Structure formats: C-alpha cells, structure tokens
Amino acid sequence: MSATLPVPISPVVLAWARQDSGYTSERVAERLQVSAERVSEWEQGRRSPTFRQVENLAKFYHRPLSLFFQPSLPSITPLAAEYRRLPNVRPGAESPELRLAVRTMSARRETMIELLDELGGTMPEFELSARLNESPADVGARLRSALALDVTAQLNWPNEWRAWAGWRAAVENIGVLVFQFPKVALDEVRGVSLLRFPLPVAGVNSKEIPETRIYTLIHEVVHLMLAMGKEEVPAEREHRSSGDWEAVERFAEESASHALVPEDALFRAITDARLPQNDWDIGDVQKLARRFKISALAMATRLRASGVFTWAKYRAWRNDWEAWVATLPARKGGFAHPVANAIGRAGRPFVTTVLEALAANRIDSVAAARHLDLKFDHFEKLRGALLNHPGEGGSDE
C-alpha cells in the first residue's frame, strides 16, 4: 500500500477518535499541516486521508492504527467514570493532555492486574476508609499509622527528593499504584485519583516540585479512603453542589496535613525552632516546612488545621505567599534519562512486575517496551537502576 494514496478508513471512527482525545479540528489540522476543512471532509467521508496521514493521526491520538479501519465505534468507558471529581474540571471537557494521562494510568492499572494474574503474584489490598463525619485529625493519624512512616526518619531525610521517594514507597506498600503524569498544566490538575478497586491509582503531576508532590499524593490517598467509605463516587456520578464539594476538598486537605505532620511533632518543632505564636511570615512557615520536607502551603494548611492559624490569618498568609511566588522566575525543566522517566512515571511496583513478566516469558520485549514506554535498549540500565537505587522515587520531568 502506497503511503501517499488515499485509504478507506471509517469516517465515524475518525471523528470519534478526535473528539474522545479532546482535540479541535484546527489543532489536528495544524499538527498534520492541512486545512481544518480537510479534516472535516475526512470525518464526513467526503475525502479520504492517505495512509501516512492516518499513521500520523494514530500517533497524535495515541490510538492503534487498526482502529481507523474498524466499521463501528469501540466500546470504551468514559474517563469521568474512573477519576474523582476535580476542581474546575468538567467531565467530558478535559484537556487532551489530561485525557491522555488518565487513559495511560488506567491502562497501566489494567496491565498490572493482568500481569499479576499471569505471574500468580499478589499486591496488598487497599483497606483504608474514611467518613466525612470523622475528625480529619483521626483520619490523618489512621493513614499515617498504615503508612508506617517514623517521624524521626522523616526529619532525617537528606532532601525533598528522598522524602518524595519515601512517601511514594509507603503509599505503594498499602496497595495504591502511584503514577506521575507529564504535560498537564498545573492550573488544570495537580493530582487525580482513579476510584477503581482493587489497585486504586493516585496520580501526581510531574510538573510539581518534590515537596508539593508529597502533599498532592497524600491528598489523593485521602480521596481514595473516602471512596472506600462510600463518601465519594467517580466524577461522572458526582452531583454534589460546589459548596458541598468544597467541604469535601477541605476535609481531604486537613486529613492529608495531619498525616504528613503529627500533632506532637508539629508543636515540638515549633518550640525547638523558636517560631512565633503570632504574626507568622512566609519565612517562618518555610522554615517549619523544610523541617518536615513538605511544601510551605501544606504546612500553612497544617497550622490552620491545628488552630495556630485562624482562617483569616491563613487567607492573609496565602495571599502573601501567592504574591511572593508570582515574583519568582519560571522553573526550568531538567533533562532526565529515559530510565529515570520510566520509573518516575510508572512506579517501581509496575516496572518490576513488567520485568518479571518478561523474564517469565509471559510477555515479549515489544510488549514490555510498550508498557514502560521505554526502548528495549535501555532495559539493562533499567534493571540496574532498580537494584542500585532502591530508595529513589523517579525523575524530575
């Protein structure tokens, strides 16, 4: 088949693939260097794209090439039937980047379940639950206990990256898949959880700095606990008012802050650092946050939860904080090796399971490379990274 000749694809599938991926005709046209009218003609069946153009569409939409030659639409669960309700994200109107991130994380979860079944392996069941009529302090303490993270060890972590690795490993140990997703704007989504059991997913935006990733991760785990307690359902079925949902978010924030910083450790650190009882400034909160390797905003939330900050003081501090952050230069992204990216995005449990399935001949090298989004040439380095750096949590993408 010539790559430059028109091919008989399914117009209805072509239109569906674009819409389900969240793209406008104009954006697709720009990517393929054709007119928006030409894209519309393809989707209406009035013209046919060339084979090379169909290949480019498949890559752009992250879909198998064979899909476009099927006569009918595939049966796919709506994305919003999997993820929790997100602030400022309307189900069905997610950005293309967020749609791809959710699809990728959902596919990894399904792959993990299939490979564990093939290998006869098991993973800890996520059994924690929470109810909105509980105290956030009690929920946070219960989560902290399940994670089995010692406060002394937390205070002695050498840096924020090591702290992120420690929290991530602890969450993975209680039966949650922790994935990172790239390319999604922070002002759209910082974190998302997939309310699927077993093996629920907590996803963290890799544009976050490490200490902020920690708070985002624990926040998402609290949402998973609420789902286990029948207090949350996926976004597609979530019909609470904005005000009621805001209360759920505040509950998750406070519970997460209590899990990150136990009460006695908080006040002991305040005393040891000789921090003020009133008139906290940005530097005071940053100093305390660095002690626990969390973000200043997470620490301010923690201070509010324990009454050190009133709501008025918290709002004033946060306004000052956001104004100060706005003056900072844009954070430059660093380069990470593909192996670090693979581990950072997919997590050690998933990467290890894929490699075990490959070694046991349950999958071939092509499937393994696809699951990890990593060229097979890098697999030896990947195995070495897992053995030589067992405590690291991935890259800064």
Image (cartoon, grey):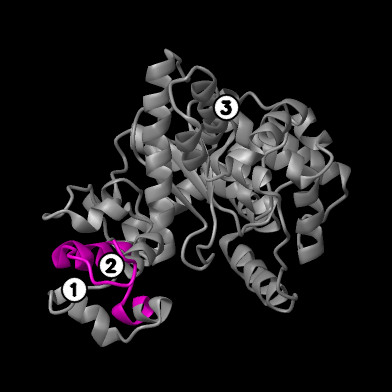
Amino acid type of the residue tagged 1 in the rendering: Glu
At horizontal 36% and vertical 34% (from top left) the residue drawn is 110
Identify the mark nearer the N-term, 2 or 1: 2
Quadrant of the frame with the C terminus: bottom right
Identify the mark nearer the N-term, 2 or 3: 2
Whole-number angstrom distance, CA of label 2 to CA of label 1: 9 Å
Can residue 385 be seen at all in this image of the molecule?
Answer: yes
Left or right, 214 with respect to 139, comes to right
At horizontal 61% and vertical 54% (from top left) the residue drawn is 301
Amino acid type of the residue tagged 2 in the rendering: Arg
Nearest the viewer among 120 and 59 is: 59
Q: Is residue 276 above or below residue 365?
A: below
Q: Which element is circle 1 on?
A: helix
User: Could you tell me residue 299's position as x and y percent?
Assistant: 68, 52
Crowding at dot 3, Cα within 10 Å, few <14 / some 14-19 / many 20+, comes out as some
Q: Is residue 344 above or below residue 175?
A: below
The disc placed on residue 18 is 2
